[in-house]
């Protein structure tokens, strides 16, 4: 199984954290997002302990909540000692509602509105990550109006091209994110931030992309960012507090994916950080990282009920499910890989080649093409694995489909953490 929380029981059914997925489908209905709390906590712990091991605790992991945002996930990661990153007023509001203290929130975004900045400043957000030089002036004005000094870091585009899907690559020069390093814009923004009375520049940030399966781009980014960190000290005399190296660590979607264990990234990057600091005579900054997918991705699965099985001889066989791109748009957007299986026949051979089709009125509404599953028939429960990240958080109501419920499972027990939407919810804001 591609994730440690998954197994088979004596009935040959797929289980997650000790819960029979066929029973979960019966109890809560489908489509259904299921997430293993055990696995989320395990991932958090492995990051926290890596910080002890490789940086002597001098830094911290921050959960990038764009991967999966709801009140319960904020409570869980907070209780494991992680800070949280938010990227919109909505995520910020949800985190605050869940009880995350402002000072443990890091606020990203390439075009934060004045209203969003005000919400952050009024709630004492501990780290506003500015994406443009001009944003610094907006933060300055909002902080001055409220008589406070806002802690700010700067998102830098380090010019590193990570090998991942082009839509989720962010560190290269041609990016809508961040302040460019090569042109000198980064140093200009540093100097501008230092000149502002109601802004306290605390650190530098970069994020090079997502679902990256190699260590080298992270090592390279750390080296480039430490050079800048050092240059800031030399040119301005300012001693910053932290360097945030972003997220992006890849996970398993298919058995054959070569996901690197988190500890291995941490080990390689920390070795490079320590070496570079030694070369530059620089005291070790606090190191932050911002994993999202690798905290929740493999902990989640989605359960569906199979409807029609449509064979087009010599072409392909479509297996229709009761979900689709409205609750998992990732295949339609990125042709993402997934492992699919029939949960109630999980111990049988997966030798049936299927195209899993959603129920939206769109030919591209597919979850996977030409994938091997157990022989399907109407009424079977189809499971799609590794859907914990960027599924619920990217869901929509396309074709007025209600978003499914999310159930959290732990040591054989289950509870709803997000209720499924109803038809009444769909018309709530219609006038
Ligand atoms: N920090 C920043 C500033 C980010 O932009 C991101 C992801 C992360 C951290 C977390 O990256 P992760 O550890 O989750 O890879 N919707 C796409 C992924 C978009 C990622 C956007 N930024 C997908 O479904 O693959």
Image: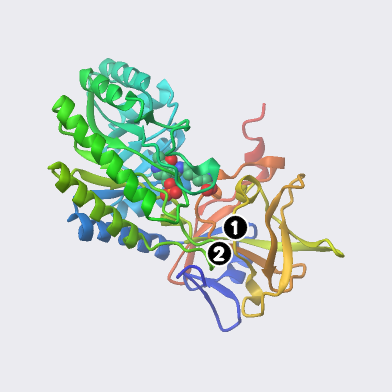
Residue matched to label 2: 254
Q: Position of residue 50 (x, y in %)?
A: 27, 59
**Residue 213, located in which quarter of the rendered image?**
bottom left
> What residue did someone put label 1 on?
337
Q: Is residue 279 left or right of residue 108?
A: left
**Residue at the (66%, 30%) spot, across then down:** 430
Check the image and report above or below for 164 versus 173: below
Query: As displayed, is residue 32 above or below residue 222?
Result: below
On the question of residue 69 being in view, the answer is no
Quadrant of res 254: bottom right
Q: Does the residue at mark 2 contact the one at mark 1 (Cβ under 8 Å)?
A: yes
How is colour applied across the structure in the image?
A: rainbow
Count of numbered tags: 2
**Residue at 19 percent of width and 51 percent of height:** 275
How dense is the environment of label 1, judged by Cα within 10 Å: few (below 14), some, or many (20 and up)?
Answer: some
The C terminus lies in quadrant: top right
In this view, the residue in front, 116 or 67, is 67
Residue 135 percent across, percent down from the top left: 36, 21
Q: Residue furthest bottom?
A: 10
């Amino acid at each position: 199984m591609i994730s440690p929380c998954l197994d088979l029981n004596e009935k040959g059914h797929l289980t997650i954290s000790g819960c029979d997925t066929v029973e979960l489908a019966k109890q809560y209905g489908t489509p259904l997002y299921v997430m293993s709390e055990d696995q989320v906590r395990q991932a958090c712990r492995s990051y926290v302990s890596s910080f002890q091991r490789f940086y002597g605790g001098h830094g911290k992991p921050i959960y990038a909540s764009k991967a999966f945002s709801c009140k319960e996930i904020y409570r869980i990661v907070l209780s494991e000692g992680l800070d949280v990153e938010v990227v919109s007023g909505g995520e910020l509001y949800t985190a605050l509602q869940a009880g995350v203290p402002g000072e443990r929130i890091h606020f990203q975004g390439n075009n934060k509105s004045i209203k969003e900045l005000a919400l952050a400043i009024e709630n004492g957000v501990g780290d506003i990550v500015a994406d443009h030089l001009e944003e610094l002036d907006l933060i300055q004005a909002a902080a001055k109006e409220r008589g406070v000094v806002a802690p700010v870091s700067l998102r830098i585009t380090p010019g590193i091209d990570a090998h991942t899907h082009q839509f989720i690559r962010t560190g290269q020069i041609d990016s809508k994110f961040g302040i460019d390093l090569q042109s000198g814009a980064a140093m200009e923004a540093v100097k501008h931030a230092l000149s502002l009375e109601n802004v306290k520049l605390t650190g530098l940030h970069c994020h090079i992309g997502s679902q990256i399966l190699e260590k080298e781009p992270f090592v390279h980014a750390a080296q480039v960012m430490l050079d800048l960190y050092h240059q800031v000290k030399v040119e301005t005399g300012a001693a910053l507090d932290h360097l945030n190296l972003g997220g992006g660590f890849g996970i398993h979607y298919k058995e054959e994916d070569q996901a690197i264990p988190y500890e291995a990234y941490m080990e390689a990057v920390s070795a490079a950080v320590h070496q570079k600091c030694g070369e530059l005579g620089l005291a070790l900054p606090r190191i932050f990282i911002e994993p999202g997918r690798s905290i929740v991705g493999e902990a989640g699965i989605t359960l569906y009920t199979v409807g029609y099985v449509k064979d087009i001889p010599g072409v392909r066989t479509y297996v229709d499910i009761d979900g689709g791109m409205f609750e998992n748009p990732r295949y339609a957007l990125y042709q993402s890989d997934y492992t699919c299986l029939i949960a109630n026949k999980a111990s049988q051979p997966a030798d049936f080649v299927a195209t899993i089709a959603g129920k939206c009125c769109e030919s591209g509404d597919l979850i996977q093409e030409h994938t091997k599953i157990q022989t399907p028939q109407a009424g079977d429960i189809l499971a799609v694995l590794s859907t914990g990240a960027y599924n619920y958080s990217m869901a929509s109501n396309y074709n007025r489909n209600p978003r499914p419920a999310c159930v959290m499972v732990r040591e054989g027990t289950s509870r709803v953490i997000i209720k499924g939407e109803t038809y009444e919810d769909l018309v709530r804001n219609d006038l």
